[in-house]
Image: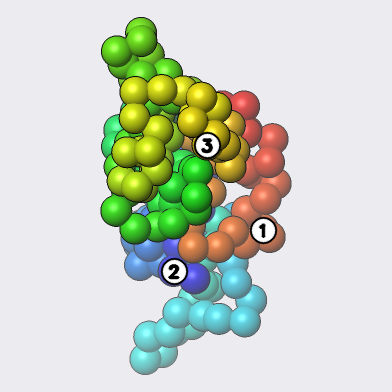
Amino acid sequence: MNSVLVLNADYSPLTLCTIERAFLLVYLKKAELISDIKEKSLRTIDHRYPFPSVIKIKNYVHVPYKGVVLSRHNIFKRDDFCCQYCGTGKDLTLDHLIPKSKGGKSSWTNLVTACKRCNTRKGDFKPEDVGLQLSKKPIRPSYVMFLKSSAKSIRKDWMPFLEHKVSA
């Protein structure tokens, strides 16, 4: 795992960064180490430093909008890069649950990832009209949900900072 959870000065999750960046922020006293990985360390010729897992920046950073931008890539990411009808990860495209021709909007709750085959089968209809069923209901993801999905895995010591912020 090569990511470090970066917290704002108020302990709210801000982003993920590399081990190197986290070490530099702590070393330059721009951040403080909250949690480290005990089994590992960063070493120079004559020093040993903690291997960061969670750091907190010292000066609060005002983030005006902590939402997730509606984009093709973010829809694919929310849907785990697989068709929401058949589960394949090949030939992916976007599908409007309520077709645009019938008043459907481009929104988090109306767009899903679909393979070309299922999207062609669905055509200009609603999924239920052609016997297709969604694997999960599309939702607007929170910033913290995307932060969690950005990491290859979530460390246990991150959970106290991520769990109570899910409604962000």
Q: Nearer the viewer, mark 1 or mark 3?
A: 3
Residue that mark 2 sits on: 2
Residue at the spot x=51%, y=80% of the render?
A: 41
Residue 154 visible in the shown view: yes
Q: Which of 12 and 99 lies nearest the eye of the viewer?
A: 99
Mark earlier in primary sequence (2, 1): 2
Does the residue at mark 2 contact the one at mark 1 (Cβ under 8 Å)?
no
Inspect the image, locate mark 2, and give the three-letter code of the amino acid beneath it: Asn
Mark earlier in primary sequence (3, 2): 2
Residue that mark 3 sits on: 132
Inspect the image, locate mark 3, and give the three-letter code of the amino acid beneath it: Leu
Residue 2 at what x, y percent from top left? Answer: 44, 69
Q: CA distance from mark 3 to mark 2?
A: 39 Å
Which picture quadrant has residue 38? bottom right
How dense is the environment of label 1, judged by Cα within 10 Å: few (below 14), some, or many (20 and up)? some
Q: Taking 162 as reference, is 45 above or below it?
A: below
Q: Is residue 30 left or right of residue 100?
A: right
Q: Please, what secondary structure does the residue beneath circle 2 have? A: loop
Q: Which of 25 and 165 lies nearest the eye of the viewer?
A: 165
Q: Is residue 166 left or right of residue 77?
A: right
Residue at the spot x=55%, y=56% of the render?
A: 54
Q: Which mark is residue 157?
A: 1
Q: Please, what secondary structure does the residue beneath circle 3 have? A: loop
Which picture quadrant has residue 36? bottom right
Q: Taking 112 as reference, is 62 above or below it?
A: above
Inspect the image, locate mark 1, and give the three-letter code of the amino acid beneath it: Asp
